[in-house]
Image (cartoon, helix red, strand yellow):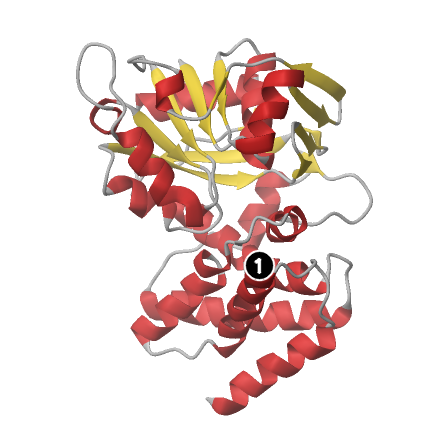
Amino acid sequence: MRYIIIGAGAIGATIGGRLAESGTESVLVARGPHAAALRANGLRLTTADGTRVHRLPVAEGPADLGELRPDDVLVLAVKTQDAVAALDTWAAAEVAGGGTAAQRLPVVCTQNGVEAERLALRRFDRVYGVCVWLPSSFLEPGAVEALCAPLTGMLHVGRYPSGTDVTAGRIAEDLAKAGFEAPVVEDVMRWKYGKLLHNVANAIQATTGPEPHPAKALLAARAVAEARAVFAAARIQVVSDAEQSAARDGKIVPPPGVRGGSSWQSLRRGTGTVEADYLNGEISLLGRLHGVPTPVNDTLRHAANIFAREGLPPGAMSIGDLTVLADEAVTRR
């Protein structure tokens, strides 16, 4: 199979680069300065094993590849706010032998949150979810770091909305050869909802900085409590913290030091958007649907979006000020 990585950022480029190292064909899809850097200098991928340069095919869209192959796998690795545009572009691409990508090819969703799979299933016949535990960073064009060891990351793979099949197994085998733990699971969304409990804190890190602080942990715990309440109201099954820890224990160990997560990195690169609408916003949506107040997550989503729209530097707000905003939102309820 050939893997077309649609969105060669921190997650996408790490997966594409690692697949290439293991002898699996992959193509990186990128735009702008990042695409130019990849074409000119290759992908500079740094892992716990060191830094390698991979000179992989680079495309900006389906037209650069011509007809897609029947054995292609589309890996959607753009942020959820960019997913619709990417899905629409690639869904219409023609596949050798007839039909479109939406009709014939699998699309694999690697985003944080739980919305990308639903967006994909509106367009593609076969959709797969991946719960990604892959701490990595993308701060400059052409260069990505993923420093966990002994494995680069853990990628639970399953059919969406549930189940497994031969394709899921083949994808998992390729990922395992590339240095990832890649369990095939019947209930991949249960794992993705479990990860969402961690991702609701992304906005705190983005707005107040990645450095740990007791007040940040307290605010994050309040956001998680709201998330658990809406999951219970919606009867959504979520993998437990103990199950997540047991799955990763000793396999994905980050290096010492503090690193900014995906939303912090988006602000650092000045992308103009963050995923907050699909992380904290998912909790807000479920809360409104099921009558559960979510003032903390509402506040975090709003604050992160202001940072993105106004181009504010990540970490420019104090945790005290962010907590005051959350408290005021609670009082207004």
Task: Indicate the secondary structure of the residue bearing disc 1.
Answer: helix
Q: Residue at x 60, y 57 (%)?
A: 202
Which percent across, then down, holds residue 52? 72, 17
In this view of the protein, which residue sits in the foreground, 118 or 185? 118
Quadrant in the picture for residue 88: top left
Residue that sits furthest to the left in the current view? 98
Q: Is residue 222 above or below residue 311?
A: below
Q: Residue at x 49, y 16 (%)?
A: 26
Residue that sits furthest to the right in the current view? 256
- All told, the count of numbered labels is 1
Q: Residue at x 37, y 26 (%)?
A: 168
Q: Is residue 4 above or below residue 276?
A: above
Q: Is residue 228 left or right of residue 187?
A: right
Residue 57 visible at all: yes
In this view of the protein, which residue sits in the foreground, 155 or 108? 108
Residue 164 visible at all: no
Q: Which residue is identified by label 1?
A: 308
- The local crowd at label 1, few if under 14, some if 14 to 19, many if 20 or more residues have their Cα within 10 Å, is many
Quadrant in the picture for residue 107: top left
In this view of the protein, which residue sits in the foreground, 236 or 41? 41
Which percent across, then down, holds residue 155? 51, 34
Which percent across, then down, holds residue 257? 82, 46
Quadrant, the N terminus = top left
Q: Is residue 141 above or below residue 98?
A: below
Q: Amino acid at mark 1?
A: Ala
Which percent across, then down, holds residue 289? 30, 71
Quadrant in the picture for residue 121: top left
